[in-house]
Amino acid sequence: MKTIAFILLAVLLTLFTTPVYADGVSPPVPVPHAFYGTVEVNSDPAPVGTEVEARGEGVQTGVNGNPVVIIVDGKYGSLDDPFEPKLIVQGDIADGTTLTFYVSGVSTGQTAEWHSGKVTEVNLTVTIEGPPPGTTDISTTISSTGIFPEAVIAESSDGLCRLTIAKDTVGLTEGGEPLSEIKMTKMGAPSAPPAGARVIGQVYDFKPDGATFNPAATLKYTYDPTRIPEGVAENDLVLAWWDTGTGKWVELESTVNPEANTITAPVSHFTAFATLAYGPPEPTAEPTPAPTPEPTPEQVAEPAPPAPPAPPASPTAPAEPINWPVLWGVIGGAVVVGLVIFLLARRKAY
């Protein structure tokens, strides 16, 4: 009895000290910490397209919400306007972890603690020497007539977008003047893609608006293969530019390199550019079988055809032969045991 009681106690302790979750459900994930506030770069309001990022131990970066792209000059996010995206900090982060804030990839030196589910205002200021990240100064590498005497490469702040301008290319502003700089900024909210397509990664806005290149420059975009929808082949990705006149994306003749996760296309003017992935076609519905017609009175009156003869029964396997020596041995053993019990009972009676 003591042994049985000990076993029952151990089972009860195991049940009441082990956390139990529903089938297939993981423990709850910490709620992200959201930040918003003002941003100044070199004492001026940060322009649209500036990136604000938080870094720290366990923090996920390069994901949706971190970094966040400014869509209103001088501030990131808003406490009142849900359309202004806040900086969303999430990941495998311990409560109280110190976060450091960056603007256009440059540390502000400002920090804050991470707490699950909080919404905090943090106003940021930063000093950036020289042209801000994503801006390429070409004023000294282009002639007075807009000709590039040597090849020039311009990159976005994250290095994922690269524009190569070949030697002897003519680069002019919309007004026909030689270009002096090239800016690549991320757009906070991309325009709606065509039906059946999805934007892969960031949308980059190239400035100055309306700049032209003759011959076309080469745009190389590095994409994240994990963002490609299931069922879409990498070779089917395309680069597209935003036509402000029609309000539509226009595809470019693109070349995909799946090993390097890059896609290239010729670019003859500046606007917004994005990588599009078209989802697999919707599965065609199975044709609905035609209903079986009801029998006519003449068909009902006709006698049913005779049923086909039943197939011959398959021969059954012969029964196993009885092992008589073993059977008699078992019976004899039972008789002997019965006699012994009978004799012992009779002896006790006397």
Image: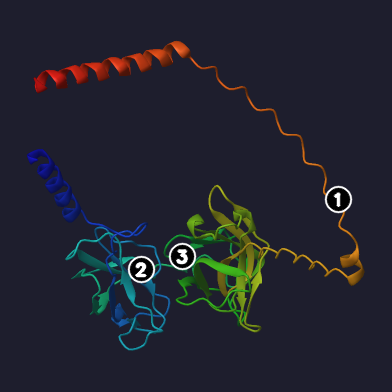
Q: Which residue is mark 3?
A: 156
Check disc 1 and give the amino acid type. Pro
Image mark for residue 306? 1
Label 2–label 1 contact, CB within 8 A: no
Location of residue 343 by image quarter: top left
Location of residue 348 by image quarter: top left
What's the distance in space between the residues labelled 3 and 1, CA to CA? 83 Å
Q: Nearer the viewer, residue 121 or 180?
A: 121
Q: Is residue 168 visible?
A: no
Of the numbered discs 3 and 1, the one sitting upstream in the chain is 3
Identified at 54% across, 17% down, the residue is 321
10 Å crowding of disc 3: few (<14), some (14-19), many (20+): many
Look at the numbered disc 3 and give the secondary structure of its residue.
loop
Check disc 2 and give the amino acid type. Asn
Apparent side of residue 193 relative to residue 86 in the rendered image (left or right): right
Apparent side of residue 34 relative to residue 83 in the rendered image (left or right): left
Q: Quadrant of the C terminus?
A: top left
Look at the numbered disc 1 and give the secondary structure of its residue.
loop
What's the distance in space between the residues labelled 2 and 1, CA to CA? 77 Å
Q: Quadrant of the N terminus?
A: top left
What's the distance in space between the residues labelled 2 and 3, CA to CA? 17 Å
10 Å crowding of disc 1: few (<14), some (14-19), many (20+): few
Look at the numbered disc 2 and give the secondary structure of its residue.
loop
Identified at 27% across, 73% down, the residue is 126
Q: Which residue is mark 2?
A: 66
